[in-house]
Image (cartoon, rainbow, N blue to C red):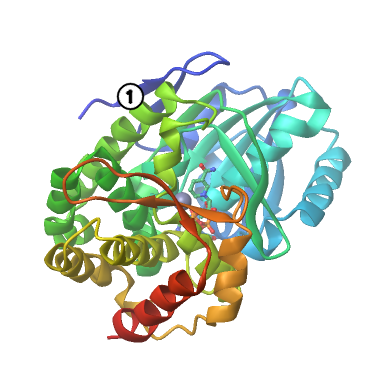
Amino acid sequence: VNDSLTIQSSKGPYSVHFVKNALSYLKKYPEDKTQLIVDAKVYELYKNNFDCELPAYKTTLIEAREELKNIDQASTYTRMLIDRQVRSDHTLIAIGGGIIQDITCFLASTLFRGMKWSFVPTTLLAQADSSIGSKSSINVGEFKNLMGTFYPPQEIFTDLQFLDTLDLADIKSGIGEILKVHMIKGIPYFESALSDYSEMLHNRLVLKDYIHKSLVFKREMIELDEFDKGPRNVMNYGHSFGHAIEAATNFAVPHGIAVTIGMDMANYQSLKMNRVSENQFKSWHIGLKKNYHSFKNVKIPIETFLMAISKDKKNVGDGLSLILPQDLGKIEKVIVPNNREFADNCQVFLDIYLSS
Ligand SMILES: NC(=O)c1ccc[n+]([C@@H]2O[C@H](COP(=O)([O-])OP(=O)(O)OC[C@H]3O[C@@H](n4cnc5c(N)ncnc54)[C@H](O)[C@@H]3O)[C@@H](O)[C@H]2O)c1
Ligand SMILES: [Zn+2]
């Protein structure tokens, strides 16, 4: 495994550095031109490291809650930075998971029409997926990631040590995105990731390998289609369903776990459209279920779910824009009529497969 990975973007290349003791790498940022935006929980867990590792940076603590990743809250965060004398030539440094990243990236891309930012991802989801790709996403009410920008960071320092304090559900959330990108790379990659599932959970070296592979596979898509105009759309596999699950449960299901259920639902829809065989669906279902088993009893009210999926930002006209796999062939975008049949398929999935 290389210890650095570079991504090309319209704003220039940026790199992920796999390092030990990530915080020590931040010392090169000058004290008077740097502002930290830190997950309050991460700060609590690692504050001793912060104290001895870092200069006296101005630090804004943010609670990583999906309900606070929204457009109303964004102006509160902006105020907090203004109170700390933020200037356009400062660099914002995000330390936390995908929520802190999305907020920081959004602020960096809009405040003063753009300032620099860098990132220390502390969750598996952020390390294996969200840290690259330059998207920021902000919720509007219960509608997920409806607003956002494309705005890459200067650099990313990935330190697997942070994963030691992560809840199991958040490890599984990250594995959800790892499984997703492997399906996009191709069915054999997806199936080998499914068969390595318990290794990934319990062996850090195996996990590191999957983090690295996930970034390499994602890089292929984002370098091909940085602004998500075509080929990159497939990265949304599991996400239309997943975002609707997050909305319908008031974000009780972590993002990557909602995406795992979402992939299973997309596969079920594919079965109903004769894109995959019953055996194929069932064998993938057994694998995916392991990753969302502990959420199988969560209540997903069908009406709220259907309302949310019909408002997904990728939809065109009245059709639902879904990313669906195929037994023989490539995963692709399919426009599916938003009708009774679709609703019934979702209902049957929730009744039979989610909780079984
Ligand atoms: N911008 C993108 O490209 C992109 C891609 C995928 C997901 N996302 C977004 O990312 C978000 C999910 O990210 P996430 O899973 O990292 O969630 P998160 O940022 O909410 O972190 C999950 C939980 O882990 C805690 N935490 C973080 N680091 C920790 C550590 N080292 N030890 C212990 N606890 C820690 C957080 O406080 C939080 O409670 C969603 O909002 C999703 O929409 C964005
Ligand atoms: Zn995601």
Q: How many marks?
A: 1
Residue 209 position within the rendered picture, expressed as x and y whole percent measured from the top left: 21, 40
- Give the amino acid at mark 1: Ser
Residue at (47, 38) in percent of width and height: 131
Is 151 left, or right, of 211 in this rendering? right
Is 263 left, or right, of 32 in this rendering? left
Residue at (79, 32) in percent of width and height: 111
For mark 1, give the secondary structure: strand
Please give the residue where the numbered disc 1 appears in the rendered image: 4
Residue 236 position within the rendered picture, expressed as x and y whole percent measured from the top left: 44, 47
Mark 1 CB lies closer than 8 A to ligand 1: no
Residue 260 position within the rendered picture, expressed as x and y whole percent measured from the top left: 35, 62
Residue 84 position within the rendered picture, expressed as x and y whole percent measured from the top left: 83, 39
Using the image as rendered, state which of residue 240 and residue 50 is in the foreground.
Answer: 240
The quadrant of the picture occupied by the C terminus is bottom left
Residue at (12, 67) in percent of width and height: 279
- Quadrant in the picture for residue 4: top left
**From where the camera sits, is residue 167 visible?**
no
Q: Badge 1 local density, few (<14 within 10 Å), some, or many (20+)? A: some
Is 132 left, or right, of 4 in this rendering? right
**From where the camera sits, is residue 344 visible?**
yes
Is 12 left, or right, of 81 in this rendering? left
Residue at (25, 40) in percent of width and height: 330
The quadrant of the picture occupied by the N terminus is top left
